[in-house]
């Protein structure tokens, strides 16, 4: 008997003794919505409000992003090849926006600019997937991650976003910068992923 | 009568550790209550429904397991079955050997703690590195996690700084920011060098074959961005029926675990990467692990398999707060551990039989459980199981003498009258069992016989006589 048959056989035997099985509840989708947070709010405004609460940063223009990066001395980064030409022009020649990501030099990129597949207003979450994110590492390894997010792709609730996960092999929700409180409960940002998470909502 | 091991651990706990565990768990519990009930006034309804969903799954694993296997395979995932811990570890090693891989980075997974995967792989010549900051510190310090969600809740920043210095990770510096940045620099090279990334799964959805992983640090994301092969080691109870059920469970999980609305990274994996995506695994395996779960399924304690490993019951438990996680001598501490650990220990059940008794049955663990597990009931069932199978265990006072006294009024009356002597006997002269019992407890002053005296002398009684 192989391991699969052995395990399934024992599961069958264990459950055979139950006189009846628990039914699957059909719960109302409204139950999983934090109405206090989302009612009477438009997705874009709520997203901008909620992302700040998880220490993310909403921005609404390329110029605002470029000014923020320049102020912090972050002049070189990775940029999605589909956006690179246009953004390089808008950022100006003092910035280097590389359409290639060299995994042997991950720390050479101060920032990574990628396309978001959506957002969740209720939680201030940026949605990335394999189809639109040109490089998983480009959105993860640099200290600053900038996700370009069309405002019409913002879902109001987490429950809405769960229903459209689709067939992409990898969807990831990023809710603020990477963080830990492992050491004495003290919050530290930028553990393995970005220390700064920016949503450029256009 | 001997002192139970958990009492011994609690009595010898360093004050610094006790205070760290107590303050941290209390604060997290209070924040959890606020964030959950502020956002969901009817949060208990969410917990009840989530519990019903999980109970449905474990009582129908015979249909869900083949169904999820089929979906995973359709998504391009290779599925393995591991009846024992050794089988699970061996499956990981076999996959690595087939790829000629010698380095693996792993995200936090409780089931791999159960199987002691890291030790197994290291013994077989594989470099296996924990990447969750807390688990990484535990690994380099040759320690054990003491909390399901916060593995180093028992450690101070000074202890971590000493550990880093001792292991060549920088000169002594106890600033948590510096410690974290040093780990960041060290570990990202390890991700990039590794061929295989290992994770667990918080949920596996039967209708879509989707694995769901939640983390805050981004370490599991790095494992799945830098490596070429993904292995997920998953307990058989992790299944959810539908994608829509995730809305309920995700809303409950982060709030219960860390008092967050949502963890920073919530990753949904439906097979290997697309050819157009340059980063991430092009090969994916799921290992379904039994390791005692099916035996639990066959008992009256099967409800414990609902657990989603949030740690909320640890944070609220007065016993965990006083004793800390190592007192439970097993992978799962706290109330969930008091049920699950003795069950998973199989023939070693008697060694952990004191754990189900380490509870006042106050019920707080069930009140906070996001899947509404009736932990107090399960603790009572385990106490009963142990009593029937093995008789009294350490920590149980002998009850034979009590039985004689309580069944004979004359003997009881005499005992009440003479019991007052206890107030005057020095501790060293007490009978052995009573002296041992009072090693960690203070006897209240003897006041026996007061009720009989009152009853006899009360005005109504005097009037009748």
Image (cartoon, coloured by chain):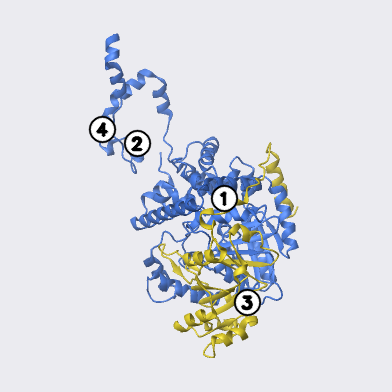
Chain colours: A yellow, B blue
Rendered-image quadrant of the C terminus of chain B: top left
For marks 1 and 4, give the one nearer the viewer.
1
The front one of B381 and A158 is A158
Q: Which residue bears the numbered disc 3?
A: A135
For marks 3 and 4, give the one nearer the viewer.
3
Rendered-image quadrant of the N terminus of chain B: top left
Q: Mark 1 vs mark 2: which is more N-terminal?
A: 1
> Which label number is shown at residue B307?
1
Q: Sort mark 4 into few (<14), some (14-19) or many (20+) by Cα contacts within 10 Å.
A: few
Q: Mark 4 vs mark 2: which is more N-terminal?
A: 4
Q: Look at the numbered disc 1 and give the secondary structure of its residue.
A: loop
Q: Position of residue A60 (x, y in %)?
A: 53, 75
Tell me whether circle 1 and circle 4 mark residues in contact (CB < 8 Å). Answer: no
The front one of B63 and B294 is B63
Tell me whether circle 1 and circle 2 mark residues in contact (CB < 8 Å). Answer: no
Tell me whether circle 3 and circle 4 mark residues in contact (CB < 8 Å). Answer: no
The part of the image, by quadrant, that contains residue B452 is top left
Q: Visible in this render: residue B122? A: no
Q: Are dots 1 and 4 on a single chain? A: yes
Residue reaching furthest top?
Answer: B465
Residue placed at 43% from the left, 31% from the top? B399
Q: Which residue bears the numbered disc 2?
A: B434
Q: Look at the numbered disc 4 and give the secondary structure of its residue.
A: helix
What whole-number distance in Å separates the C-alpha atoms at marks 3 and 1?
A: 35 Å
User: Taking B384 as reference, is B340 above or below it?
Assistant: below
For marks 1 and 2, give the one nearer the viewer.
1
Q: Which residue bears the numbered disc 4?
A: B423
User: Taking B27 as reference, is B364 above or below it?
Assistant: above
Q: Are dots 3 and 1 on a single chain? A: no
């Amino acid at each position: 008997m192989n391991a699969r048959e052995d395990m399934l056989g024992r599961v069958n035997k264990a459950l055979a003794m139950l006189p009846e099985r628990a039914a699957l509840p059909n719960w109302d989708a409204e139950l999983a919505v934090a109405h206090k947070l989302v009612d009477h709010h438009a997705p874009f405004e709520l997203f901008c409000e909620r992302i700040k609460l998880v220490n993310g940063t909403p921005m609404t223009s390329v110029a605002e992003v470029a000014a923020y990066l320049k102020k912090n001395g972050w002049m070189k980064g990775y940029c999605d090849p589909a956006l690179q030409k246009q953004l390089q022009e808008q950022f100006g020649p003092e910035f280097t926006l590389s359409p290639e990501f060299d995994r042997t030099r991950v720390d050479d990129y101060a920032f990574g600019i990628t396309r978001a597949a959506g957002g969740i207003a209720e939680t201030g979450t940026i949605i990335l997937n394999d189809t639109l994110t040109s490089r998983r590492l480009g959105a993860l390894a640099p200290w600053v991650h900038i996700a370009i997010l069309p405002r019409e792709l913002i879902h109001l609730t987490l429950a809405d976003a769960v229903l459209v996960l689709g067939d992409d092999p990898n969807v990831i929700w990023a809710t603020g910068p990477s963080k830990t409180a492992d050491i004495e409960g003290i919050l530290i940002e930028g553990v393995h992923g970005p220390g700064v998470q920016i949503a450029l909502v256009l | 009568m001997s002192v139970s091991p958990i009492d011994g651990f609690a009595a010898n706990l360093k004050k610094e550790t006790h205070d760290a565990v107590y303050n941290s768990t209390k604060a997290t519990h209070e924040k959890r209550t606020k964030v959950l009930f502020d956002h969901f006034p009817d949060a208990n309804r969410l917990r009840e429904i989530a519990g019903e969903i999980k109970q449905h799954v474990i009582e129908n694993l015979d249909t869900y397991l083949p169904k999820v296997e089929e979906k995973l395979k359709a998504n391009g995932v290779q599925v393995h079955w591991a009846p024992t811990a050794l089988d699970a570890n061996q499956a990981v090693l076999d996959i690595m050997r087939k790829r000629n891989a010698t380095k693996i980075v792993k995200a936090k997974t409780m089931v791999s703690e159960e199987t002691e995967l890291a030790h197994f792989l290291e013994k077989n010549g594989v470099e296996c590195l924990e990447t969750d900051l807390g688990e990484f510190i535990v690994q380099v310090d040759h320690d054990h996690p003491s909390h399901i969600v916060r593995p180093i809740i028992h450690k101070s920043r000074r202890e971590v700084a000493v550990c880093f210095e001792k292991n060549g990770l920088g000169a002594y510096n106890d600033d948590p920011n510096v410690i974290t940045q040093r780990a960041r620099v060290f570990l990202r090279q390890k991700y990039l060098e590794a061929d295989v990334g290992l994770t667990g799964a918080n949920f596996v959805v039967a209708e879509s074959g989707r694995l769901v992983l939640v983390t805050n640090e981004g370490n599991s994301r790095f494992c799945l961005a830098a490596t070429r092969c993904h292995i997920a080691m998953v307990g058989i109870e992790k299944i959810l029926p539908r994608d829509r059920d995730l809305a309920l469970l995700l809303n409950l999980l982060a709030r219960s675990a860390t008092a967050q609305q949502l963890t920073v990274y919530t990753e949904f994996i439906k097979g290997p990467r697309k050819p157009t995506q340059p980063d991430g695994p092009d090969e994916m395996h799921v290992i379904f692990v039994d390791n005692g779960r099916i035996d639990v399924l066959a008992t009256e304690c099967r409800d414990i398999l609902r657990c989603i490993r949030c740690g909320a019951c640890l944070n609220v438990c007065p016993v965990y707060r006083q004793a800390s996680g190592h007192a439970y001598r097993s992978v799962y501490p706290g109330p969930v551990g008091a049920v699950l650990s003795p069950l998973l220990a199989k023939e070693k059940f008697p060694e952990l039989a004191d754990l189900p008794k380490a509870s006042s049955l106050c019920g707080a663990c069930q009140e906070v459980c996001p899947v509404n597990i009736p932990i107090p009931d399960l603790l009572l069932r385990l106490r009963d199981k142990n009593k029937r199978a093995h008789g009294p265990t350490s920590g149980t006072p002998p009850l034979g003498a009590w039985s004689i006294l309580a069944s004979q009024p004359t003997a009881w009356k005499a005992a009440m009258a003479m019991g007052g002597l206890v107030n005057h006997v020095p501790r060293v002269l007490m009978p052995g069992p009573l002296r041992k019992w009072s090693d960690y407890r203070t006897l209240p002053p003897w006041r026996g016989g007061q009720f009989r005296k009152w009853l006899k002398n009360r005005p109504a009684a005097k009037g009748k006589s």
